[in-house]
Amino acid sequence: TINLTANTYYPFRIMFGEMGGGYDSQSWFVSPQGTTYYNGTGFYYVTPQISSPNNNNNYQLGLSDTTNRSSPVQIGTDVYRAVSQTPGSEYAAAIRGDGKLFTWGFNNVGQLGDGTTTTRSSPVQISTSSWKEVYAGTNFSLALRSDNLLFGWGYNTDGGIGNLSTVSTSSPVLVSGPAGVSWSFVAGVSTIFAITTTGLLYSWGQCNSSTQGGAPGQGGIGTGNISSPVLVSGPTGAV
């Protein structure tokens, strides 16, 4: 249990291409662009590293300008419960306290999910749905909706969106999977792993000799990208 004190800043665990492990105030990140902190009032702050010369060149701080910051600056007045950014990327995503999803920053391949490839200088809402978790990858995103369905958008040449396609998209599309499947957790960078609500592990996306020794855990499939979730094989009888 962590007790938060109003107006006091708390650094939380690293989210390196990870989707949160819960969508509460502990889901914050540390990245080369800066360190994100959460305070007791629920606001989202960013402290960019002064040594990084391009830490806000594509509005990735969400502050409506490209000025670098050396101290925490509040982004609007909304209260957020989860935020995600992959180190090296130039955009971010966050879920507001009411479950609404927002993104901002660089958007050259539709990674913001707002139906455009227009870079955004401040948070823009993505759809009217309610969301549980979000993972903002290097140039594509995955988000878990409140009904446990998984959606993806952005760069898709490696099949990371998981929708049986390698065509990039600027709007959320449903991740393909077994009929009736619902998801509880997703993580990864270029190779994606996701757990269903029944505890089964699936993977998809980039699949070469540097990602999980060839196929991402599916044993025997070999190399080659995978554009939809495939059940990860394990030892006989493993649960």
Image: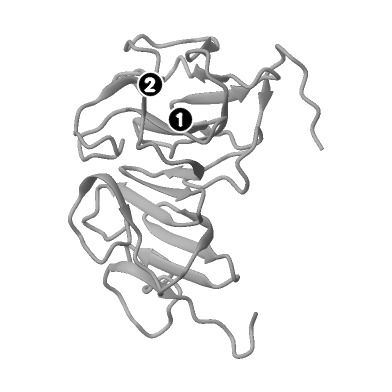
In the rendered view, would you say 93 is above or below 223?
above
Residue at 61% across, 49% down: 21
Say whether residue 37 is left or right of residue 33: right
Which residue is the site of mark 1? 32
In the rendered view, would you say 160 is above or below 37?
below
Q: What element carries label 1?
A: loop
**Amino acid marked by disc 1:** Pro
In the rendered view, would you say 5 is above or below 19?
above
Q: Do the residues labelled 1 and 2 touch (CB within 8 Å)?
A: yes
- Quarter of the image for residue 225 reads bottom left
- Assign the N terminus to one quadrant of the image: top right
Could you say where residue 178 lies in the image, as x and y percent from the top left? Answer: 41, 74
Which residue is the site of mark 2? 55
- Assign the C terminus to one quadrant of the image: bottom right
Residue at 52% across, 70% down: 201
* Other-residue count near label 2 (Cα within 10 Å), few / some / many at <14 / 14–19 / ≥20: many
Say whether residue 227 is left or right of residue 11: left
First in sequence, mark 1 or 2: give its number.
Answer: 1
Question: Which disc, if any, is residue 235?
Answer: none
For the question of whether residue 104 can be seen, the reply is yes
Q: What element carries label 2?
A: loop
Residue at 45% across, 36% down: 85
- Quarter of the image for residue 127 reads top left
Q: How is the image coloured?
A: one colour
**Amino acid marked by disc 2:** Asn
- Quarter of the image for residue 23 reads top right
> How many callouts does the rendering have?
2
Could you say where residue 40 lies in the image, as x and y percent from the top left? Answer: 71, 19
Could you say where residue 219 lies in the image, as x and y percent from the top left? Answer: 43, 82
